[in-house]
Amino acid sequence: MNTTIMRADQLEARFERLLVDFGNLQQQVAGLLNQLQGLQGGNQQPQGGGGGGTYESTAVLAPGTNTGITVSSRTSAGINALPGTYTVYNDMGTTSTVSGKTIILSNNGDGTFTVVTQSCT
C-alpha cells in the first residue's frame, strides 16, 4: 500500500511540474505572438523581407501628427516602400530636416509610426 501511495505522489508531482511547464509555454507563445504583431505593424506587413527592422521616411515632418506619409522598411533585401501611406508622430519639437534626409521611425504596432531620430548630414 505504501508503494501505491508513493507512486501516486510521484505522478502528482510530475503532473504539477507539467502544468507549470505548460503555463510557461503558453506565456512564451503569447509573448511571441505580441512581438510578431508589433513587427508587422498591426495588419501592415513590410514587403521584400518581412518582419521587423528599421523603418524610415524622407518626408519633411512637422512637429505633432503627420498623415499621408510614405514609410519604407530597410531589410537585408534593401529599402522597400510599405503599401499605402501612414500617420507619423514627430515629438522632436521641431520640423524635420529637408526632404531627402533619412528619418528613422519606430513602428507603434497600430499602423502608425513615431520619429526616433533624423539625419543631420
Image: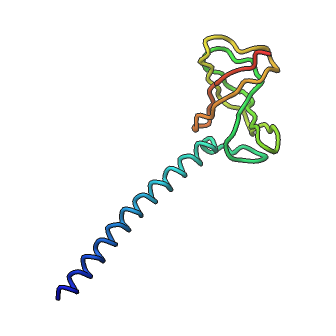
Question: As drawn, which residue projects farthest toward the bottom?
Answer: 1
Instruction: Specify the quadrant of the image occupied by residue 85.
Output: top right
Q: Residue 11 location, x and y as percent?
A: 30, 77
Q: Residue 32 location, x and y as percent?
A: 54, 51
Colour treatment of the image: rainbow
- Residue found 75% across the figure and 14% down from its top: 97
- Residue found 70% across the figure and 35% down from its top: 54
Q: Is residue 25 above or below residue 40?
A: below
Question: As drawn, which residue projects farthest toward the left?
Answer: 1
Question: As drawn, which residue projects farthest toward the top?
Answer: 94
Across the whole image, how many numbered discs are drawn on residues?
0
Instruction: Specify the quadrant of the image occupied by residue 68.
Output: top right
Q: Residue 88 location, x and y as percent?
A: 65, 26
Asked if residue 19 lies left or right of residue 80, the reply is left
- Residue found 36% across the figure and 62% down from its top: 20
Q: Quadrant of the C terminus?
A: top right
Q: Is residue 19 above or below residue 59?
A: below
Asked if residue 17 lies left or right of residue 37, the reply is left
